Amino acid sequence: MDIKNEETGSHGRYSATLDGHTGEMTYSRASPTLIIIDHTGVPDELRGKGIGQALAQNAVDAARKGGWKIIPLCPFMRAQAQRHPDWQDVIQG
């Protein structure tokens, strides 16, 4: 699955398109070492296909690579962070 990252100023978006439908995870950069994930949206056509999980894993991988932490304000990302104790190195709060 190809996940794209777009960042404009302090706002960013990870997106993945499958079968013509796009799921997204949006974030705000609070500082050079902290992002706040505030929304995850997956259209009904993509539910159950692992898009949300792939976006969350991508955010964690990017945080590890970039050396920043994630505040999971989005309920989906917060739930994923609780399910994955191995992500705690990049989760704040």
Image (cartoon, helix red, strand yellow):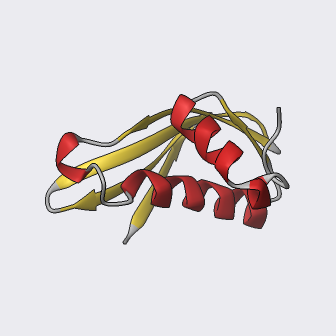
- Judge from the rendering whether residue 41 lies leftward or rightward of residue 88; answer left or right: left
- Judge from the rendering whether residue 32 lies leftward or rightward of residue 52; answer left or right: right
Q: Quadrant of the C terminus?
A: top right
> Residue 72: image x %, image y %?
66, 35
Q: Quadrant of the N terminus?
A: bottom left
Numbered-mark total: 0
- Could you say which is closer to the camera, residue 47 or residue 66? 47
> Residue 83: image x %, image y %?
65, 49
Give the residue displayed 80% in from the left and 46% down from the top. Answer: 69
- Judge from the rendering whether residue 69 lies leftward or rightward of residue 8; answer left or right: right
Quarter of the image for residue 30 reads top right
Give the residue displayed 82% in from the left and 45% down from the top. Answer: 33
Give the residue displayed 55% in from the left and 52% down from the top. Answer: 56
Quarter of the image for residue 17 reads bottom left
Give the residue displayed 78% in from the left and 45% down from the top. Answer: 91
- Could you say which is closer to the camera, residue 67 or residue 7? 67
Q: Which residue, as the protein is rendered here, is positioned at the far bottom?
A: 1
> Residue 87: image x %, image y %?
75, 56
> Residue 44: image x %, image y %?
20, 41
1 lies above or below 10: below
19 lies above or below 26: below
